[in-house]
Image: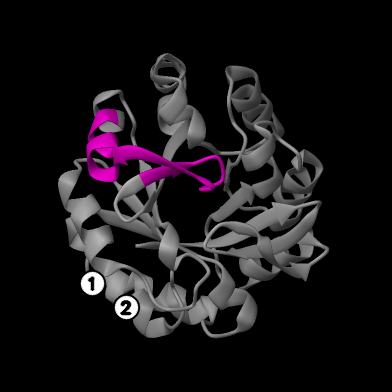
Amino acid sequence: MRIYPAIDLSEGQCVRLHRGDMAAKTVYSDDPAAVARRWAAAGAEFIHVVDLDGSFAGRPCNLDAVRAILAAGGLPVQVGGGVRDEATIRAYLDAGVTRVILGTAAVRDRGFVEAALATYGEALVIDIGARDGRVAVQGWAEATDLDAVEFAHAMQAAGARRLVFTDVLTDGASQGPNLEAQRRMAQALDIPLIASGGITTLADVAAIAAIESYGVEGLIIGRALYEGTVDLAEAIKIARQ
């Protein structure tokens, strides 16, 4: 299992939110490139980046910071937040991003996402954030009536090669992951799942690693790395075991 250290961007800074709430934003660094170098030095193999401003604006807002992360870390990067059209996908890939993440657009424009998956395949990841089992969009600020597992099935049928699944109520809450939700989602799919949300301790990392056999290929860790409750190098060791 692979650990994906997260860099969430807002106004060019590295931040974290509490349960997706922009009003509950904590700034951890004004130098995302330095953070990328830190994660690379700790042994990271891939970095997960979210343009939080883009998630709400519907367009990229932190492209310069993404470019700086790419240049500094020397690692593959996957980026999401505000990707609503093919031009944005292309711009990120041309900048050197390895994978582009589609979230809100996958819900609201099925024709676009199906065409994009057919064109870009492995270079795209579908992001599903859920509150109480229902898909949330627009930076998780808006609820839908879509069942998260059913929507994941639809994305798999549309050609998705990989999903990120976040239980929104655990994200940034430092209360541990929703293991049952992650296991249920992974078991329902035939494609790899990257789990996200709630990781607070190394025991949480071990708990997610224990359900790897269900199809969990990766784990995103954010706040716990910045607040020091999880050491990235140790988390990577656990994941590899």
Residues at marks 1 and 2, CA–CA distance in whole angstroms = 6 Å
**Residue 11 tag number:** none
Q: Which residues are magenta?
A: 135-154
Q: Report the side of 188 relative to 177 (left or right).
A: left
Q: Position of residue 223 (x, y in %)?
A: 58, 72
Which is more toward the observer, 36 or 188?
188
Residue 197 visible: no
Residue 48 visible: yes
| Magenta span contains residue 128 | no
Tell me the residue that label 1 is attached to. 210
Query: Badge 2: how crowded within 10 Å, few (<14), some, or many (20+)?
Result: some
**Quarter of the C terminus within the rendering:** bottom left
Query: Badge 1: how crowded within 10 Å, few (<14), some, or many (20+)?
Result: some
Q: Name the residue: 28% across, 76% down.
A: 207
Q: Report the side of 94 relative to 145 (left or right).
A: right
Q: Amino acid at mark 1?
A: Ala
Which is more toward the observer, 133 or 238?
133
Q: Position of residue 220 (x, y in %)?
A: 47, 61
Q: Position of residue 16 (x, y in %)?
A: 64, 65
Q: Name the residue: 23% across, 72% down.
A: 210
- Residue 80, quarter of the rendered image: top right
**Quarter of the N terminus within the rendering:** bottom left
Which is more toward the observer, 25 or 44?
25
Q: Position of residue 238 (x, y in %)?
A: 37, 77
Tell me the SS state at disc 1.
loop
Tell me the residue that label 2 is attached to. 206
Q: Amino acid at mark 2?
A: Ala
- Residue 154, quarter of the rendered image: top left
Residue 52 position (above or below residue 146): below
Tell me the SS state at disc 2.
helix
Q: Report the side of 114 relative to 90 (left or right).
A: left
- Kindly indicate whether the residue at mark 2 contacts the one at mark 1 (C-beta within 8 angstroms): yes
